[in-house]
Amino acid sequence: MPFDRLFRDQLDTLKAEGNYRYFADLTRRCGAHPRATNTTEDGVAREVTVWCSNDYLGMGHHPDVVAAMARTAQTCGTGAGGTRNISGTQHQHLELEAELADLHGKAAALIFSSGYVSNWATLSTLGSRLPNAVILSDAGNHASMIEGIRHSKARKVIWAHNDVADLERKLAALPANATKIVAFESVYSMDGDIAPIEAICDVAETYGAMTYLDEVHAVGMYGPRGGGVAEERGLMDRVTVIEGTLGKAFGVMGGYIAGSAEVCDFIRSFASGFIFTTALPPAIAAAATASIRHLKESRAERDLQKRQVARLRAGLDRHGIPHMANDSHIVPVLIKDPVKTRMLSDYLMDEWGIYVQPINYPTVPKGTERLRFTPGPAHSDADIDHLVDALNVLWKQCAVARATA
Ligand SMILES: *Cc1c(COP(=O)(O)O)cnc(C)c1O
């Protein structure tokens, strides 16, 4: 086709930079997490251990969650049948929203097709409809927040990542009549660092700003009931809107916000990305509710995740393999070169049965390419030892720098 040349040129540039993305063909097998079947380009099936899943706690295979999805599909069918406004609101959606409001100690919650859509729809609606809105966005915020802010056409002020002093300076410089919205995350997914939520809430309150917190990489995993870092630190009531996903630690799909009855009703009533799209299938909502309920009661998954994260870090330290220090469950190993990162990832898959996706631009800045490991409760001690052995051997073969400290 005559236009294909236009597409191919840009793809060729990506390939030359080492930033072209290759998907791994995986088949998950229920109950076998983190094991999966990888089908190679030649059609050969092989078993791999997944080390980069965002199904952080393996809840996508939990018997209660799978049973809720299967049972609901059998009794209610597959699709919701419409948008939430037009015949799509199912009993399971309302149950899920009540569960989420309770999880975050808020009056209400509102679900979306995904976490991406929840950020995009909520921030674009807040920014476009509130009078003189100014959105103060952490420099490390996720693409879905950035796109929502951009779409709102509101004034945007970027503050240095996790830098409360910079946030305060920028809040102080804004006019008194601005409606200020401070948008940030709790656990940042690529570096695994955690925001100083309390200090951010302090300055936001001082300057009369509302707070919008993305807890996507924290819900299910932090706090006594899996309500996230804000729950762990006793700060949920100080955050105006908490946003989360049902697709990562909860192991299903969908996104949400939790907040006051008014803010949820406002987004429900004005957000295009909520109104004009088919509601989640009831089976998905029921599975998410089962997962949240389980993790509210059970600490076993969170405790074991912490243990396995510590074990992997200790193993890497023993061999001088540098990894980014942080207080979360995310273990990034910086390679700082897209081609080398891809090569290490291929070796791990082909020679060691270890699947870890190379993380490259634009997910992370150029020059900070990395392997990002997410140990969870289903990784055995032997799995971790095998990974550490593999990295140790590869570090010798590929002459990647070791930590010298
Ligand atoms: C993954 C992610 C999202 C989007 O959530 P999905 O449910 O996957 O669409 C939002 N925010 C952050 C920080 C994320 O990493």
Image: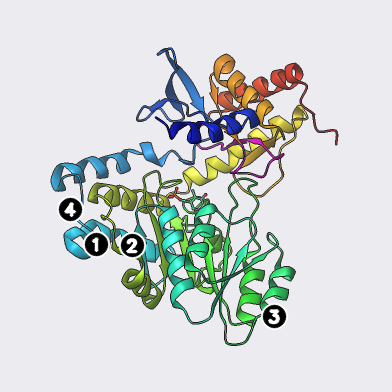
**Label whose residue precedes the other's in the sequence (3 or 1):** 1
Labels 2 and 1 touching (C-beta < 8 A): yes
44 left or right, relative to 276: right
- Where is residue 201? Give x, y as percent: 61, 72
Q: Amino acid at mark 1?
A: Arg
Is 228 rendered above or below residue 66? Answer: below
Determine the residue positioned at 75% across, 34% down.
322
Residue bearing mark 4: 81
Around disc 2, counting alpha carbons within 10 Å, would you say few (fewer than 14), some (14 to 19), or many (20 or more)?
many
Amino acid type, callout 4: Gly
Does residue 134 appear left or right of residue 247 in this picture? right
Mark 4 vs mark 2, CA separation in Å: 15 Å
The span from disc 3 to disc 1 (Cα, nearest Å) is 40 Å
Callout 3, which amino acid?
Ala
The residue under label 2 is which amino acid type? Phe
**29 sits to left or right of 373:** left
Going from N to C along the chain, the mark reached first, 2 or 1, is 1
The answer to whether marks 4 and 3 mark residues whose Cβ atoms lie closer than 8 Å is no
Residue 172, labelled with which disc?
3
How packed is label 1: few (under 14 Cα within 10 Å), some, or many (20 or more)? many
At mark 4, the secondary structure is loop
Q: Find numbered disc 3 in the image and state the secondary structure of the residue it sits on.
A: helix
Residue 228 seen in the figure = no
Residue on which disc 1 sits: 84
Label annotation for residue 274: 2
335 magenta-colored: no
Q: Is 373 in the magenta?
A: yes
